Image: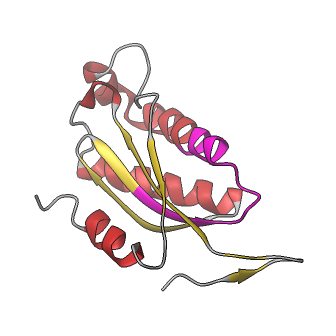
Amino acid sequence: MIEVTHGRGYVYSIQYHIVWCVKYRHKILTPQIENKLIEILNMIADCEDFQIIECNTDKDHIHILINCSPQHYIPNMIQKLKGVSSRLLMKEFGEILRKRLWGGHLWNPSYFVATVSENTEEQIRKYIKNQKRK
């Protein structure tokens, strides 16, 4: 259950379901790369002061469910998540990734984002958890 948070002069509960794809939808998110990616995303969330509630990948895309404050601006958050993760993954797995991806880009520039309500939260959690089981 997602909690209501009390700020100074306001109360909020803000969650987003975010999805983005690997450039050209290449299936490059191996278990090793996926583990490092999730570690990086959690590090970014800690630094930027938001919470990743659920996170899962399927070889060519990633789903995350985040909990954030009203001060977070979604395009900036996604830019950080995609930019930092791309840079760090290319640094660590560059030889593997560059064989499949040219131009130095890991992620497709677009993304999907939807708000999450208390009525849909559990459905979205299950959907994200079951990404590899199609």
Q: Nearer the viewer, residue 18 or 104?
A: 18
> Which residue sits at x=31%, y=63%?
128
Judge whether 111 appears above or below 38 on screen: above
Image position, residue 56 (x, y; %): 33, 59
Whole-percent x and y of residue 3?
Answer: 59, 84
Range covered by the magenta-colored residues: 64-81
Give the quadrant of the C terminus. bottom left
Q: Which residue is farthest right?
A: 9
**Residue toward you, 38 or 122:** 122
29 is higher (above) or lower (below) than 124: above
Q: Tell me residue 117's x, y (percent).
A: 49, 72
89 shown above or below 46: above
What residue appears at the point 29 percent right and 29 percent down from the top-left corner? 96
Instruction: Give the quadrant of residue 59.
Output: top left
Q: Indicate the colouring scheme.
A: secondary structure
Magenta stretch holds residue 76: yes
Q: Is residue 111 left or right of residue 10?
A: left
Side (left or right) of 27 relative to 78: left
Query: Total label count?
Result: 0
Query: Relative to residue 93, is residue 58 depicted above or below?
Result: below
Q: Residue at image x 55%, y 45%?
A: 81
User: Which residue in the rendered view is the most extreme toward the left?
Assistant: 134
- Residue 82, position as x, y percentages in the image: 51, 39
Left or right: residue 132 versus residue 13 is: left
In the picture provided, is 37 more to the left or to the right than 3?
left
